[in-house]
Image: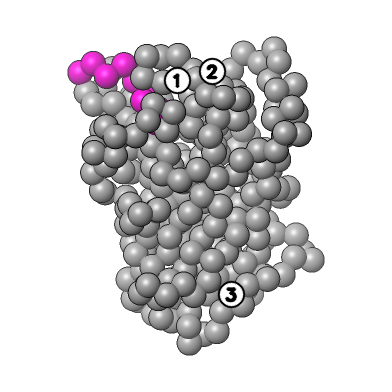
Amino acid sequence: MTLRTKLALGAALLALTAGSVAVDATGIGGVPSARAAEEPAGVAATSTPSVSVSAGKLKRIDTIELGAESLEFRDDDKTVADVSMRDAASTVDLLNRLLGTPSRTQTAVGDGGACFPSGTTYTWGGAVRVAALTTPSTIGNAVEIRVLKDSVRSRTGAEVELTGPGGVQVGDDVGDRLRDAPRSDKVAFGDGDGDARAWQLLLEPGWAPTADDRAAEGAAGQGATGQGATGQDGHADGADESGTNGVSALTSDTVVSVLGSPMPVHAQRSC
């Protein structure tokens, strides 16, 4: 099995369990107008941003960090805004104001692959992708976020760094982390023979399901035949059907290729 095949399988599996981690749909939905950029589609018409950042503070943002349940905007070591992923309007609004007009795609359930949510997907500079969900998921998130590069240009042309927890970026070698991580925090894709395998590494847990969520997922999962994520020995494991959700790194061999949240590790159900 070639590395390309393994990466495709890995990306497909993550798409099944976590949403939009695969191919960029830039341009399919057209580019929104300036007014549309200020009033994001895919967010309820009555929804308004709850996080306010002045233009002066916005211009000084030099880092965006994807956490397990929020997107943090920083000026050096100072936090300018920490936006919950339950707040789709603020997430899209701040990224629009900072990074400019995104490409935009309207999606129905399943348009982007099995289990892909309905809503509007925004992509800024081929580097940050936000899927604003029509209806929040059962764990509470209103957006799904993927980081595809280590930096992106702002409206003013300044470089904004893109990171995950602990400063992990796309392009970093996380071989040491993979070796040290407990088996419960990582999943290998492919059989490991020949070309190097791809990995999913949980960087920070979050989005813990409630007891009601677990019961609902367990009931929904009865009789399901879809494949879930598998561990290094090919067997699915995890304490419940949803696995451990949070922000993860997807790798090619040991090099980070995507950061994403929510992204469950060791989820046993296909959806």
x and y percentages locating residue 86 in the rendered image: 65, 55
Horizontal side of residue 168 vs 215, given as left or right: left
x and y percentages locating residue 28 in the rendered image: 54, 50
Say what secondary structure mark 3 lies in: helix
The residue wearing badge 2 is: 227
Of marks 1 and 2, the one in the foreground: 1
Q: Is residue 271 above or below residue 28?
A: above
The residue wearing badge 1 is: 230
x and y percentages locating residue 264 in the rendered image: 52, 35
Residue located 27% across and 32% down the image: 179
The quarter of the picture where residue 51 lies is bottom right
Residue located 29% across and 39% down the image: 177
Residue type indicated by callout 3: Ala
Circle 2: is it few (<14), some (14-19), or many (20+) Cα within 10 Å? Answer: some
The reply to whether the C-beta atoms of the residues labelled 1 and 2 are less than 8 Å apart is yes
Task: For the C terminus, give its image quadrant.
Answer: top right
Residue located 51% across and 39% down the image: 263
The span from disc 3 to disc 2 (Cα, nearest Å) is 43 Å
N-terminal-most mark, 3 or 2: 3
The residue wearing badge 3 is: 34
Q: Is residue 71 above or below residue 180?
A: below
N-terminal-most mark, 1 or 3: 3
Query: Bounds of the magenta span?
Result: 186-194
The span from disc 1 to disc 3 (Cα, nearest Å) is 44 Å
The quarter of the picture where residue 115 lies is top right
